[in-house]
Amino acid sequence: MTDFQFESSFGRRLGMAHTAMFRHLSKLMKEKNLPITPDQFRVLTHLWKQDGMQQSELAVCTARNRANVTRIIDILEREGIVIRKDDPSDRRVFRIYLTELGKSLKEATAECANQSIEDSLVGISGEERGIVMKVLNQIVKNVG
């Protein structure tokens, strides 16, 4: 059996890159005094595309469990960024809608996300970026 080198493993490096980008995005959002976190941003990106989604749909879209999405929505609702409304065709289901504040956050958070990505890719050529995207897509295909 070979000796597994966790610290230098592909999975560890991938996780470290994700964490670094996540922290950098959080820092940029705090600098702009945005009242959301990167996890909340992940949920909001789907509502900006399709307002009024069900909580269960948001869980699937964000690859998060329902409890985690419920917690995020609770916080966003408390901050006045989203509101829950009963689904007119199924009283057991809530739909999540953006408030005016929630809608107004889209541009500034998108700027932070773009800046975070660009900062992360400094010194990486277009060709290398293409290779990385191809590799990441294949990983998702293989084990996603």
Image: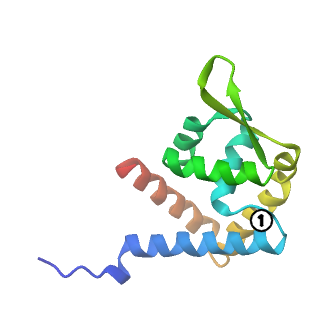
Residue 113 in the image: x percent, y percent? 73, 62
Q: List the residue tagged with mark 1.
A: 112
In this rendering, position of residue 110 left or right of residue 74:
right
Position of 12 relative to 76 (above/below): below
Residue occupying image coordinates x 53% and y 52%:
68
Residue occupying image coordinates x 59% and y 41%:
58
Residue occupying image coordinates x 63% and y 53%:
72
Q: Is residue 63 visible?
A: no
The residue furthest top is 89
Position of 49 relative to 36 (above/below): above
User: In front: 56, or 111?
Assistant: 56
Residue 106 in the image: x percent, y percent? 81, 51
Residue 39 in the image: x percent, y percent? 63, 59
Position of 81 relative to 83 (above/below): below
Q: Amino acid at mark 1?
A: Cys
Which quarter of the figure has residue 8?
Answer: bottom left
